[in-house]
Amino acid sequence: MARDRNELGSFLRSRREKVDAASAGVVHTTRRRVKGLRREELALLAGLSPSYYTRIEQGRDRHPSREILDALARVLLLNDTERAHLWSLAMPSLAPATPHAASAHTVRPGVLHLLERWADMPAFVVGPSRDVLAGTPLAARVNPAWSVGHNLIEFTFLDPRAREVYPDWNEISTQAVAGLRATAATRGAELDGFVAGMRERSETFRALWDSHDVHDRVTGEKQLRVDGVGLVRLSFETFAIAGPEGHVLYVYFLQPGSENHEALSSLG
């Protein structure tokens, strides 16, 4: 994701094309031939001149004011994650400083101690680019992607085992890229090299990244095909670990009464 690319304009255009014109208050009496809002429609709804908004989208003004960003976010119906991403593209100087490389890959001893006590749960810690930095043995047994040294994004798009492990691969891959976009909202410079490499190595990743979808999924369910067990549906929660490293703890668990409880426990 080279910094000389017009990421701000591409993001605004992608969101503009997803807005329902009628819901945004645009009245039209003829059949529309364009998706979403036109540039001039978005500009007027946001209180901007069409020529000035065009300059922003074409990359001729890459640092609009806070007020303009807020107005565009309002019309485009951006959620909190998308707003943060918009701000990171227009005002990258506000993003937090990147931690030293050594500390970025070092999990605190206290977190490692907690993982040792959670032997009956698949749990692991990832860095901003989704490298698995630490985890429980059960995590590696349930999903090879959750093994220390693996990368969740690389596994999803580059490892042939991923489509076997994830029956809902299309959904998983879309969410993975949207989540990485959410992280890039505050740690873009840190992820530039990784994203650029993935864009070259996977056409599917490139297409999903260029769709500019942003979603920070912090809880939910995931269906996995586990060797020796079969299909398992696990719930998960995520916990941001305070500190400059940007580490996130993933904890997966079975709901009470799950039919896979004994089989999954035996894997530990």
Image (cartoon, grey):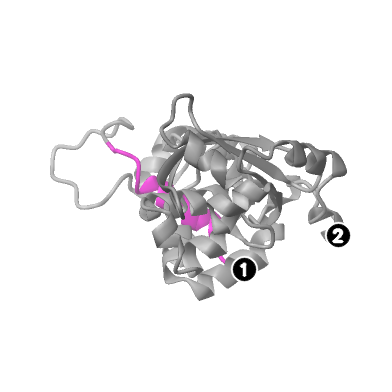
Residue 79, horizontal then vertical, whole percent: 50, 34
- As rendered, which of 17 and 58 lies closer to the eye? 17
In the rendered image, residue 73 lying in the magenta stretch gets the answer no
Asked if 191 appears above or below 267 in the picture, the reply is: below
Label 2 sits on a secondary structure element that is helix
| First reached walking from the N terminus: tag 2 or tag 1 | 1
Asked if 187 appears above or below 235 in the picture, the reply is: below
Tell whether 49 sits left or right of 268.
left
Asked if 166 appears above or below 84 in the picture, the reply is: below
Label 1 sits on a secondary structure element that is loop
Residue 138, horizontal then vertical, whole percent: 62, 47
Residue at which label 1 appears:
2
In this orientation, does residue 82 appear?
no
Tell whether 43 sits left or right of 99.
left
Amino acid bearing label 2: Ala
Q: Tell me the quarter of the picture where residue 4 sits.
A: bottom right
**Label 2–label 1 contact, CB within 8 A:** no
Residue at which label 2 appears:
102
Q: Which marked residue is nearer to the observer: mark 2 or mark 1?
A: 2
Residue 71, horizontal then vertical, whole percent: 51, 34
- As rendered, which of 46 and 148 lies closer to the eye? 148
Image quarter of the N terminus:
bottom right
The label number, if any, that marks residue 264 in the structure image = none
In this orientation, does residue 192 appear?
yes
Question: In this picture, which residue range is highlighted in magenta?
Answer: 1-21
Q: Which residue is located at x 54 percent, y 53 percent?
A: 143
In the rendered image, residue 6 lying in the magenta stretch gets the answer yes
Amino acid bearing label 1: Ala
How many residues crowd mark 2 within 10 Å: few (<14), some (14–19), many (20+)? Answer: few
